[in-house]
Image (tube, rainbow, N blue to C red):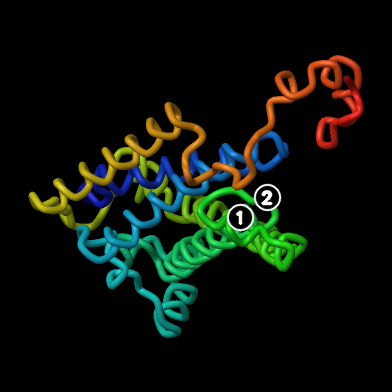
Amino acid sequence: MKKSYIWSLPTRVFHWLFVLFILLAFLSAQEDRWLDYHAIVGYAILILLVFRIIWGVIGPKYSLFKDFPIGKSNVKEFLNNIFESKQKYIGHNPLASYVMISMFIVAILIIITGILAFGIQEGKGILSFLNTSLFKKMELFKEIHEVLTSLFIALIIAHLAGILSDRLLHKKHETLNSIISGYKVTQEDKSIKLNIYQKIFSILMFLFFVGFLVFNFYKPDNILITSKYEQIDYNVQNELFVSECASCHTLYPSQSFT
């Protein structure tokens, strides 16, 4: 038995950043006051997905989409031999391939519907111009966003179930450990190596991702989350209203106080 380097560092970094930011997305969706942060997290996930899609075309073997063993015959063969100790698939197996592809597609649709809902209903972000009398009461995209989120949770459960079953049935292959170490136990050496172009691309994308987060930290009122409505400083406009009534009527200050 050999230990083969299957998952490159960029692939592993993507995986754990994706896990972290999906978790942040769920947490930031719990409170309306965290909505702006939720939007930024969504855009960050989109950057990760753009990297993974490109990486699935130009990356190393096992990370390539063309290496995903999809197809009815592959699924049937995998299920028929699932209890065998000898592994045929070094990278993703057929079921894992379908789950991963589905997660990427659903995540992209969640982000798109989120951007639409953010713009239409909240009047914020790059689609804030859609917050008009014609569209702003439309909750369609918010509802689709929530349905897709539930579907994504189901895919996460399927992914975790696959990891658990592999751990129980094929523990010696160290598939779970491989997403941390990069190494998997194989019959013969199947290691991959990154070329200079793959290294440069992954470094540039990582720097862009970090730069995006830093930019939003130092400029939180940027175009991605800014509101189409100008904020009113009621302390300046009507100080008496703020001190007497603002706790109940912040949206509609009376103009009768003098």
Residue 47 or 2: which is nearer the viewer? 47
Name the amino acid type tagged 1: Gly
Q: How many marks?
A: 2
Q: Position of residue 91 (x, y in %)?
A: 32, 60
Crowd class of label 2 (few under 14; some 14 to 19; many from 20; radius 10 Å): many
Question: Residue 137 falls in which quadrant of the image?
Answer: bottom right
Name the amino acid type tagged 2: Glu
Circles 2 and 1 in contact, beta carbons < 8 Å: yes
Residue 200 or 91: which is nearer the viewer? 200
Label 1 sits on a secondary structure element that is helix
Q: Residue furthest left?
A: 196
- Could you tell me if residue 17 is visible in this image? yes
Q: Position of residue 209 (x, y in %)?
A: 34, 41
Residue 256 or 148: which is nearer the viewer? 256
Q: Position of residue 178 (x, y in %)?
A: 34, 45
Q: Position of residue 44 (x, y in %)?
A: 44, 45
Q: Which residue is mark 2?
A: 122
Q: Residue furthest front?
A: 258
Query: Residue placed at 32% from the left, 66% from the top?
Result: 89
Alpha-carbon distance for marks 2 and 1? 6 Å
Compared to residue 178, the image places residue 84 above or below, namely below
Query: Residue placed at 22% from the left, 47% from the top?
Result: 202
Query: Residue placed at 41% from the left, 84% from the top?
Result: 73
Which of the numbered marks, if any, corresponds to residue 139?
A: none
Quadrant of image for the C terminus: top right
In the image: residue 5, left or right of residue 126: left
- Could you tell me if residue 154 is visible in this image? no
Q: Which residue is mark 1?
A: 119
Residue 250 or 76: which is nearer the viewer? 250
Label 2 sits on a secondary structure element that is helix
Crowd class of label 1 (few under 14; some 14 to 19; many from 20; radius 10 Å): many
